[in-house]
């Protein structure tokens, strides 16, 4: 990758890279790879720090988290600058994609952590009615976070915040392509007063990520591609480490005949081009019903023509993170064109950047024999396929190895919900794009090859704990029926009891 250039180092020295701005290629600094023994040491120190942190009351942890919110609000320009340089992204996009969701996550979990982590006394089912059941949350220990380059700050903050509030330590391995944004996360929490070893960062590429898993973390959160996710899942499985995988996608938009065209056109374009198409739940393919297709396509092309692509921080669309990413886009577009697709706008590199860029592109006459409709493109490319009706659109939307998210554009809420129920994705937005990712009280994740497990949602914070059920005897009898001796009489009595109880429609309601 041109944004990363290896520096020659002598034997035994850690590997180093020069890091450059993706759009301008201006040098940003050096990345020194953390060797595997230092990764192990980081996890060891984190484990020590976590033991003390687990004893800090949740309310005090939440107070520190709110201090981190204040610091992020105060220093946001500094943070925005670093993220913009690392990613080559615009300022408003950085605020929308990194700062707002980060502040929101921190404030939300700080407010609710005490309630969500409190011991819960749960009503028992019939056979255990005479016992009291309390479910308590015990922190897991050291939580490893491996993040991609396309949301380098927020994708570290999102899993780390509930993990820290739940009493865990966090060690993050940011993408080698965006190392400075990854480090911001550590700076922020340390500045807020979180203990130094509780929040750490190890630097490097895939080798460092693999070393973090092998260093004995107690749980791992991985966000990245499906191909790497599979390796990470295998390594976690071998080490018997619980994990969540947030992976790639090929999100479809279904544009129904009764869609509000103004909204659908703008929404689909924003959903596709946001972050220059480098967005996990960005729209990657559109199915539009034939009765409105011509008008929809005409308006899409007109609005895409208005997008401003350059680099000064105020642009709509920017350079790609690396030349490798442009190679993928070019391959998908060329493959589609060679199989009969037509380019209505774009369809070529944008050579006005020193870094690698591709013009916002709209394709028609596409089909599922083309990579652009089946593989993750991760760029500013909008392939539009005309379909007979919504059923055909849904069948094509579901014809994918991926299932991260999807969108439906219609004025009919009942129809939207019916389509959403049948869409094989982890979440669906109606007349909206990607917002499910920001809904903290909703579980987020993919189905099929888009992920394993869920993040966010009220349950998410408890997933960073071992939920430990504790059962108390209430009656204080000298002996229980199921203790020795196991006489025939007891067996007969129990059979009578279950026959009466589970055989009665009325009593079954008490189960
Ligand atoms: P990668 O899978 O290439 O990398 C993700 C992270 O894993 C990086 O930090 C990478 O290091 C590291 N890594 C690479 N190899 C290994 C390994 N063997 N063991 C452990 N860690 C390893 O993804 P990208 O960075 O290219 O990110 C883009 C992808 O992320 C897209 O597919 C996108 O859809 C997905 N994504 C999914 C999201 C979701 O919520 N579902 C959200 C955002 C992105 P390094 O980069 O330094 O090589």
Image (cartoon, rainbow, N blue to C red):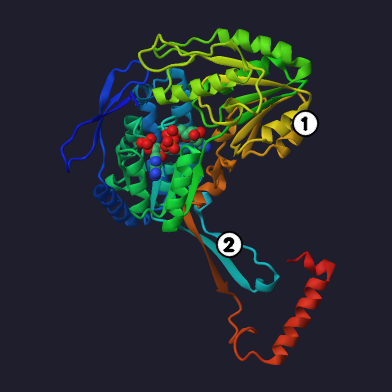
Image coordinates for residue 14, horizontal then vertical, percent: 21, 40
- Residue 156 visible to the viewer: no
252 or 190, nearer to the observer: 252
User: Farthest right residue?
Assistant: 505
Looking at the rendering, the quadrant in which ligand 1 lies is: top left
Image coordinates for residue 357, horizontal then vertical, percent: 43, 16
At mark 2, the secondary structure is: strand
Label 2: few (<14), some or many (≥20) within 10 Å? Answer: some
Instruction: Say whether disc 1 or disc 2 marks the residue closer to the N-terminus.
Output: 2
At mark 1, the secondary structure is: helix
**Location of residue 453 with respect to 415 vertically, above or below:** below
> Which of the 4 image quarters holds residue 204?
top left
- The residue at the point 47 percent across, 43 percent down is 229
69 or 320, nearer to the observer: 320
232 or 180, nearer to the observer: 232
Give residue 121's mark.
2
Image coordinates for residue 233, horizontal then vertical, percent: 47, 49
- The residue at the point 49 percent across, 20 percent down is 330
Q: Is residue 328 left or right of residue 391?
A: left
**Location of residue 313 with respect to 209 vertically, above or below:** above
Distance from the alpha carbon under mark 1 to that under mark 2: 46 Å
- Residue 267 visible to the viewer: yes
- The residue at the point 83 percent across, 67 percent down is 506
Q: Determine which residue is flagged by label 1.
A: 391
């Amino acid at each position: 990758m041109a944004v990363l250039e290896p520096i020659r180092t002598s034997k035994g020295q850690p590997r180093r890279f020069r890091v450059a701005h993706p759009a301008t290629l201006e040098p940003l600094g050096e990345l020194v790879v953390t060797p595997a023994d230092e990764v192990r040491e980081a996890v060891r120190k984190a484990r020590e720090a976590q033991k003390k942190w687990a004893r800090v009351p949740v309310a005090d942890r939440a107070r520190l988290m709110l201090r981190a919110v204040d610091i992020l609000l105060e220093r946001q320009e500094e943070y925005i600058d670093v993220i913009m340089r690392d990613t080559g992204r615009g300022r408003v996009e950085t605020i929308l994609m990194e700062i707002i969701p980060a502040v929101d996550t921190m404030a939300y979990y700080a407010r609710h952590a005490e309630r969500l982590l409190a011991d819960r006394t749960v009503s028992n089912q019939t056979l255990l009615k005479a016992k009291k059941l309390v479910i308590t949350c015990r922190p897991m220990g050291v939580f490893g976070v491996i993040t991609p380059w396309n949301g380098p700050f927020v994708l570290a903050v999102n899993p780390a915040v509930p993990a820290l509030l739940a009493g865990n330590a966090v060690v993050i391995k940011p993408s080698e392509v965006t190392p400075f944004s990854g480090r911001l996360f550590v700076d922020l929490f340390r500045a807020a007063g979180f203990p130094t070893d509780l929040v750490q960062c190890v630097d490097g590429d895939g080798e460092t990520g693999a070393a973090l898993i092998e260093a004995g973390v107690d749980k791992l959160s991985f966000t990245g591609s499906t191909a790497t996710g599979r390796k990470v899942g295998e390594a976690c499985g071998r080490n018997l480490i619980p994990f969540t995988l947030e992976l790639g996608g090929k999100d479809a938009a279904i544009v129904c005949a009764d869609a509000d065209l103004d909204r659908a056109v703008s929404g689909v374009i924003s959903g596709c081009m946001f972050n220059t198409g480098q967005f996990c739940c960005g729209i990657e393919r559109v199915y539009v019903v034939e009765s409105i297709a011509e008008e929809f396509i005409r308006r899409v092309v007109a609005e895409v023509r208005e997008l401003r692509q350059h680099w000064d921080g105020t642009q709509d669309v920017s350079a790609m993170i690396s030349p490798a990413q442009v190679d993928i886009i070019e391959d998908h577009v060329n493959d589609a064109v060679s199989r009969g697709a037509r380019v209505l706008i774009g369809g070529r590199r944008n050579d006005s950047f020193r870094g690698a860029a591709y013009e916002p592109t709209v394709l028609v006459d596409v089909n599922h024999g083309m990579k652009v409709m089946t593989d993750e493109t991760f760029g500013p490319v909008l392939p539009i396929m005309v379909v007979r009706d919504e059923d055909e659109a849904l069948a094509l939307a579901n014809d994918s190895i991926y299932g991260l998210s999807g969108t439906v554009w219609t004025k009919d809420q009942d129809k939207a919900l019916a389509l959403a129920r049948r869409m094989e994705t982890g979440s669906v937005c109606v007349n909206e794009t990607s917002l499910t990712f920001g809904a903290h009280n909703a579980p987020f994740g993919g189905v099929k090859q888009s992920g394993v497990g869920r993040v966010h949602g009220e349950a998410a914070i408890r997933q960073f704990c071992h939920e430990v059920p504790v059962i108390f005897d209430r009656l204080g009898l000298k002996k229980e029926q199921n203790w020795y001796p196991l006489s025939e009489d007891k067996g007969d009595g129990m059979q009578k009891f279950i026959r009466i109880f589970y055989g009665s429609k009325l009593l079954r309601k008490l189960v």
